[in-house]
Structure formats: C-alpha cells, structure tokens
C-alpha cells in the first residue's frame, strides 16, 4: 500500500496538536501516513505529550545532504524545470535554494513508498512540493490555514500542479478561488477531540469569573485590548480574573501593559502549557477571549477546544470565526479592536452565571456537531480520494 506523505513545516511545534490528531485519525482509518517536515523545530518547541513520538517519526528535508545533490545531477531535465519555476516567482533565489531539499523529498518518497504528499502550509512548503513534483516526485495537495497575503505571493504557481487545495474556512476558500479559478475548494476545518476536551465533572470553583486566552504572545492576538477592557471593568466594580497562556515576541510588552494598568492582582501570565494543562485550565475557566486583529487568523483551534469544554467564547470577527459560532448564542462576536464591545461582552459573562451556563451548553453542542477531529479527518481523506490522491 502506498503511503500519504504529511508535510508540516518545523513539526512538531507548540500549535501542532491538531495536526497530530488528524494524523492519528487518518491512521485509525487505515491510511499509512508518513510524517515529513522542512527542518527540525528548536528543542522544547513542542510542550505536548506526543512531541518525542512525533519527532522520532518525522523525516526532515533540510539539510538535504550529498545524496540529494547527486540526485539533481542525475536529473538534468527535472532540474531545468525546477530552475525555470524558481526563476518565475517572487524571491527566485530563495525558492531556487529549496531545490536540493525538494530532491531530498523525491528520494525519501521513493524509498518509503509515498505516492502523494499533503502540505499543511501555503508558504515555502508549497513551493517545495511543487518543485519535488517537477523533479519526478509524487503529486501533492495543500491545505491553507490563513490569509494568502500572510503566505507570500505566487499562489497560482503553487496551486497550478496540485491535485487538491482545501481551506479551513469559507473566507479562505474564496481567496483561493480568486487565484485558482475553476476549481472546487473544499472547506475542511481542523478538529478537536471532543471526547477529551469536554466540560469538567462537577461545578467550577467559586469566586470571580475566570477568563482565559490561549494564543501566541504577539500584538495581533489582541491581548492589549482585553487588558484595557479589564481595567475599565475593575474601575466599574466588576470582578474578573484573566489567565494568559502562551509565549511569543510580545511577552514583555504584555507584562508591561499589565503593570501599567495595575492589573497584577487579577491577570496571570501562565507561559507555555502542554495539552493536559490547557485542558485542565479550560475546564476550570468560565469563558475564552480571543481578540485577534489583522490577518493570519482563520479557524482558531483554541476557540474549538474552549467550546468543546463548554465555555462561551468572546471572539473578534476575523477569518472564519463567524462560521464557527453565532453571536449571542455560543458567545459574542466583536468587531476587531473594539474595546467597548469587548468590555460589554466580558461584563455580561462576568456578572451573569446563567448566561454563561446557557452559552456554554450551546458552545459544547456546536463543537460536538462541527469540530470532531475524526469527522474532519474523514472529510479530508474523502476529498483526497476524490482527487485521486489516495
């Protein structure tokens, strides 16, 4: 049986739990899935229990090694096609530098019986798969996880030879259709384990309402907007506790914002947590807040996990969030950067336990119906089969 290559850049990483779930479901469904990645992640990048197992199973394409260079010398026509492709895209030298790693991919796929490669990225990894095909390697497909503008340019070239391109939200599918007209673009979100991510048994602890954000610590995730909303509510006498989970380049700025607003007694920065600790935190929280702005957000897995745990969600209208929840039903959708709306939503949930319970129950029901990772992996497999990839 030929295998499906599953290519994720710098796998495994902090945000890659949903990839591991999808691979597990595809394997449970009978596919032989071989993990591929561009390069090894930095030590400690993945805090989850599957990290060591995933890294041990993953073949890394960089550095490509001497065998790849010898392989290129033996395939002059393929090399000419790859060089012509690189010459026709933005950042030609950078893309041409991927060719040896593409040859490494070709050789690895031949050795391991990999007949198709599915790429979970629309940046350089998609170029890499296209180059590998030109060098005589397997066909490929792509899942797009964020706005195309975030992934560089030349997407029409990346998609031109693909058997299938999928998107995790309908807005992303519309972007893909605009540069790849005439093709079906299935919308297949990543999923969560709704059996594991579920409400805790028994009542949550007493005390002020507890809000949590699980996201990379960078400005576009909107932590600063939430902090200013909490400062307003403190001044209005509304009690709320806020836990920030994650790491990133703006950790210092967020800590400085907490201090400047005098929120040290009600805001905690928990740092990077593994899956088990995130689950435990969600099961003791009252709501999730994700106030992202700008580009890059699509179908946030943190929102899915929180909803599966029975939490109402306060989320900005960004990417596909409006497809994931209905404003006023499973939580609140707020305009990007609108601190008045964030303040009102946090206040409503902080002061009304019955509202939290009602929205949380609706969120759990929506998650079970729409976000089960086994269902979504099955849809991906069916789309790949329809495209002749597996």
Image (cartoon, rainbow, N blue to C red):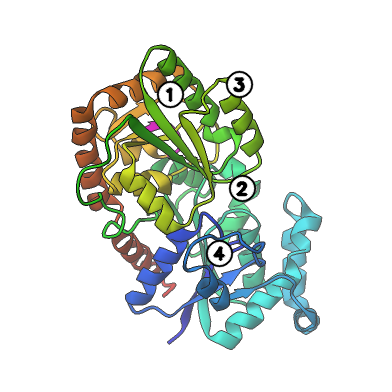
Front tag of 4 and 2: 4
Q: Which residues are magenta?
A: 314-319
Above/below status of 381 relative to 251? below
Residue at mark 2: 151
Q: Position of residue 169 (x, y in %)?
A: 41, 45
For marks 2 and 1 on the same chain, the one whose residue lies earlier in the sequence: 2
For marks 1 and 4 on the same chain, the one whose residue lies earlier in the sequence: 4
For marks 3 and 1 on the same chain, the one whose residue lies earlier in the sequence: 3
Q: Are marks 4 and 3 in contact (CB under 8 Å)?
A: no
- The part of the image, by quadrant, that contains residue 351 is top left
Q: Are marks 3 and 1 in contact (CB under 8 Å)?
A: no
Question: Is residue 243 magenta-colored?
Answer: no
The image quadrant where one finds the C terminus is bottom left
Front tag of 2 and 3: 3
Q: Position of residue 385 (x, y in %)?
A: 37, 71
Secondary-structure class at tag 3: helix
Residue at mark 1: 335
Q: Is residue 175 left or right of residue 110?
A: left
Q: Is residue 161 left or right of residue 383?
A: right
Q: CA distance from mark 4 to mark 3?
A: 36 Å
Secondary-structure class at tag 2: helix
Q: CA distance from mark 3 to mark 1?
A: 25 Å
Front tag of 4 and 3: 3
Residue at mark 4: 12
Q: CA distance from mark 1 to mark 4?
A: 33 Å
Front tag of 3 and 1: 3
């Amino acid at each position: 049986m030929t295998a499906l290559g599953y290519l994720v850049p710098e796998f495994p990483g902090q945000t890659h739990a949903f990839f591991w779930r999808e691979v597990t479901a595809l394997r449970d469904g009978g596919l032989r899935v071989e993990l591929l990645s561009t390069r090894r992640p930095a030590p400690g990048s993945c805090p989850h229990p599957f990290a060591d197992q995933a890294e041990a199973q993953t073949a890394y394409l960089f550095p490509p090694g001497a065998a790849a260079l010898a392989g290129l010398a033996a395939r002059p026509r393929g090399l000419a096609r790859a060089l012509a492709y690189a010459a026709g895209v933005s950042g030609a030298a950078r893309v041409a530098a991927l060719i040896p790693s593409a040859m490494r991919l070709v050789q690895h796929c031949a050795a391991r019986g990999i007949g198709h490669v599915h790429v979970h990225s629309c940046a350089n990894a998609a170029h890499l798969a296209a180059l590998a095909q030109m060098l005589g390697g397997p066909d490929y497909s792509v899942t797009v996880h964020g706005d195309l503008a975030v992934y560089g340019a030349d997407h029409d070239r990346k998609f031109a030879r693909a058997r299938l391109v999928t998107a995790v939200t309908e807005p992303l599918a519309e972007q893909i259709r605009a540069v790849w007209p005439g093709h079906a673009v299935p919308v297949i979100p990543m999923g969560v384990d709704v059996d594991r991510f579920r409400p805790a048994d028994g009542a949550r602890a007493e005390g002020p309402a507890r809000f949590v954000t699980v996201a990379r610590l960078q400005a576009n995730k909107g932590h600063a907007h939430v902090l200013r909303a909490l400062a307003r509510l403190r001044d209005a006498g509304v009690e709320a506790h806020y836990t920030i989970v994650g790491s990133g380049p703006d950790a210092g700025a967020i800590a400085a914002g907490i201090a400047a607003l005098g929120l040290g007694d009600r805001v905690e920065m928990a740092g990077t947590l593994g899956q088990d600790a995130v689950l435990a935190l969600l099961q003791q929280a009252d709501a999730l807040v994700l106030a992202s702005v700008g580009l890059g957000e699509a179908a946030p897995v943190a929102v899915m996990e929180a909803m599966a745990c029975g939490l109402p969600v306060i989320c900005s209208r960004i990417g596909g969030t409006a497809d994931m929840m209905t404003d006023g039903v499973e939580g609140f959708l707020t305009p990007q950067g609108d601190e008045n709306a964030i303040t009102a939503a946090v206040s409503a949930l902080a002061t009304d336990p019955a509202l939290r319970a009602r929205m949380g129950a609706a969120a759990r029901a929506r998650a079970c119906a729409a976000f089960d990772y086994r269902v979504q992996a099955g849809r991906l497999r069916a789309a790949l089969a329809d495209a002749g990839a597996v």
